[in-house]
């Protein structure tokens, strides 16, 4: 799962440094993630994992690190899975 | 280099009614300030000077410590009460009200994001006790007006830091006692990794680079500066600015600006009503003005929208998760767009009701200053930029 998250971040996060240099717990906002890029990351994660984030997870900290994204994805109820 | 210009000359002494210390109600304190602001509004606008008398009245009434808790020597009033005060002062002098609003936004950002620190507790106590006026240096040359992006960076050694910022605008920068500035956390940090630093004027050198000659809001004296500062490390707010912006600075700015604008609209409608009433008396017509009736309906809708958003923030303000959602960001952005458009429509409508008497600048029902002050609402954080941000956020958010 983390590899797939990292792949999405690599393509969409537009970080100031390479995602490979960052640990799973590194603060992505400190690494240059902008709110605009967050939207693109979120849409790409939904495509990659075929889910829809509920509104309650559309928070800044949901996308704050690889670990935070992993936790958020794990918490998305199965009913949010796309048909 | 211009050596630190002396803090603004204080205006004529405001005579606070002698009713004892601390017993006056918030309403009475604000009424005193509003009356003072009204007396100087025309000159502040015409000459483009800082509303020194009104700000001195705010100091005398303790208003600059309004958001600071009573345990630290402030007045500890609610966001609803502060928003109401913006509207009351805004009905008399939009520049005074905007200075008041901008100061409260800076104080709110500090109060809500420095809890638990003795240094900040003492600093906020000092702001309340000596009624220090706080300006903001958030905009920067070369970042395209993006609050969440900085070019300048904090240079920190063990106990002191320095920063140099090209600020296209620091409203009332020459008159402020403190300046709250954004900068990148360090030289190697990306543009969005920002922190706030609270600078004393004595720690700053301000080199003025432009003069504020604007259509309206002329008393805010939003000149441009090169800001150079040398400050103690403690003055850097530890929390990331990203969080402060989302949870406090952006929502509180839009709430308090909208409250000031509501004040401008309220007074424009009042002037239209005065004209319509006098006109009916003169002409003997008792049917009234349908245009005025429509205008009052628009004003009531505007007022309801502002009040609802102030209540909404108040309900969410202690729950960061409730403030940090994309849905709430969209909502707050919409308040800014709706409020600024409502203001301009209402003021233009008031001008049509009052006719030539409203168009003239020398009548009691003149709407000219309201129109000029009100147009600024559309461009202080341009509505086009906010709509573009919402368009992007709406790709993600599903809340209706």
Image (tube, rainbow, N blue to C red):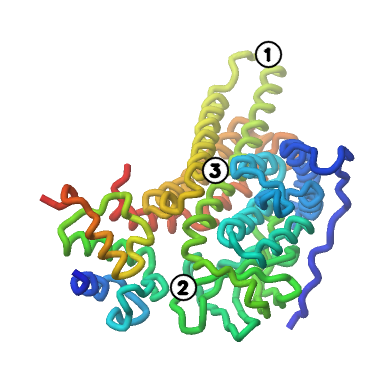
Image coordinates of residue A16 in percent, x first then y, are 37, 79
For mark 3, what is the residue? B344
Identify the residue at the far left of this view: A83
Name which quarter of the figure residue A45 lies in: bottom left
**Who comes first in sequence, dot 1 or dot 2?**
2
* B362 up-or-down from B68: above or below: above
Image coordinates of residue B38 in percent, x first then y, are 77, 42
Image coordinates of residue B151 in percent, x first then y, are 51, 77
Q: Residue at x 60, y 34 (%)?
A: B350
Out of B247 and B170, give the one closest to the viewer. Answer: B247
Using residue B35 as the reference point, say whether residue B325 is left or right of it.
left
For mark 1, what is the residue? B284
Looking at the image, is mark 3 or mark 1 nearer the viewer? 3
Using residue B124 as the reference point, say whether residue B249 is left or right of it.
left
**Who comes first in sequence, dot 3 or dot 1?**
1
Circles 1 and 2 on the same subunit: yes
Q: Residue at x 72, y 59 (%)?
A: B125
Image coordinates of residue B171 in percent, x first then y, are 66, 62
Circles 2 and 3 on the same subunit: yes
């Amino acid at each position: 799962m983390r590899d797939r998250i990292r792949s999405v971040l690599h393509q969409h996060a537009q970080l100031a440094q390479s995602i490979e240099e960052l640990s799973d717990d590194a603060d992505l906002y400190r690494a240059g993630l902008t709110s605009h890029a967050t939207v693109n990351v979120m849409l790409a994660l939904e495509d990659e994992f075929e889910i829809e984030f509920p509104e309650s997870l559309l928070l800044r900290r949901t996308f704050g690190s690889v670990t935070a994204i992993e936790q958020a994805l794990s918490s998305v109820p199965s009913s949010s899975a796309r048909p | 280099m211009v050596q630190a210009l002396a803090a603004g000359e204080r205006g004529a002494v405001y005579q606070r009614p002698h009713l004892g210390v601390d017993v006056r109600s918030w309403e009475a304190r604000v009424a005193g300030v509003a009356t003072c602001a009204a007396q100087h509004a025309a000159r502040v606008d015409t000459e483009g000077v800082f509303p020194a008398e009104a700000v001195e009245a705010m100091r005398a009434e303790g208003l600059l410590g309004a958001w600071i808790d009573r345990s630290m020597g402030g007045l500890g009033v609610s966001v609803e009460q502060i928003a109401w005060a913006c509207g009351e002062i805004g009905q008399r002098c939009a520049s005074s009200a905007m200075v008041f609003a901008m100061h409260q936004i800076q104080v709110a950002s500090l109060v809500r994001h420095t809890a638990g620190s003795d240094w900040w507790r003492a600093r906020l106590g000092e702001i309340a006790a000596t009624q220090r006026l706080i300006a903001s240096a958030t905009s920067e040359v070369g970042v395209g007006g993006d609050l969440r992006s900085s070019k300048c960076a904090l240079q920190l050694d063990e106990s002191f830091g320095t920063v140099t910022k090209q600020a296209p605008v620091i409203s009332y920068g020459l008159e402020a006692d403190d300046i709250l500035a954004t900068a990148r956390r360090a030289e190697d940090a990306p543009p969005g990794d920002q922190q706030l630093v609270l600078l004393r004027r004595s720690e700053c050198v301000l080199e003025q680079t432009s003069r504020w000659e604007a259509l309206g809001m002329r008393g805010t004296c939003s000149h441009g500066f090169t800001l150079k500062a040398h400050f103690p490390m403690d003055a850097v707010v530890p929390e990331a600015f990203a969080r402060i912006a989302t949870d406090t600075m952006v929502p509180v700015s839009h709430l308090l600006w909208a409250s000031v604008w509501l004040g401008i609209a309220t007074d424009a409608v009042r002037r239209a009503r005065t004209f319509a009433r006098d006109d009916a008396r003169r002409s003997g017509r008792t049917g009234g003005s349908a245009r005025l009736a429509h205008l009052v309906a628009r004003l009531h809708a505007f007022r309801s929208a502002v009040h609802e958003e102030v209540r909404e923030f108040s309900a969410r303000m202690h729950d960061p998760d409730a403030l940090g959602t994309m849905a709430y960001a969209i909502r707050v952005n919409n308040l800014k767009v709706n409020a600024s458009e409502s203001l301009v429509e209402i003021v233009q409508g008031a001008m049509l009701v009052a006719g030539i008497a409203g168009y003239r600048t020398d009548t009691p029902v003149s709407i000219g200053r309201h129109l000029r002050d009100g147009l600024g609402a559309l461009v202080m954080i341009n509505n086009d930029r906010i709509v573009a941000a919402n368009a992007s956020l709406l790709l993600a958010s599903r809340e209706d």
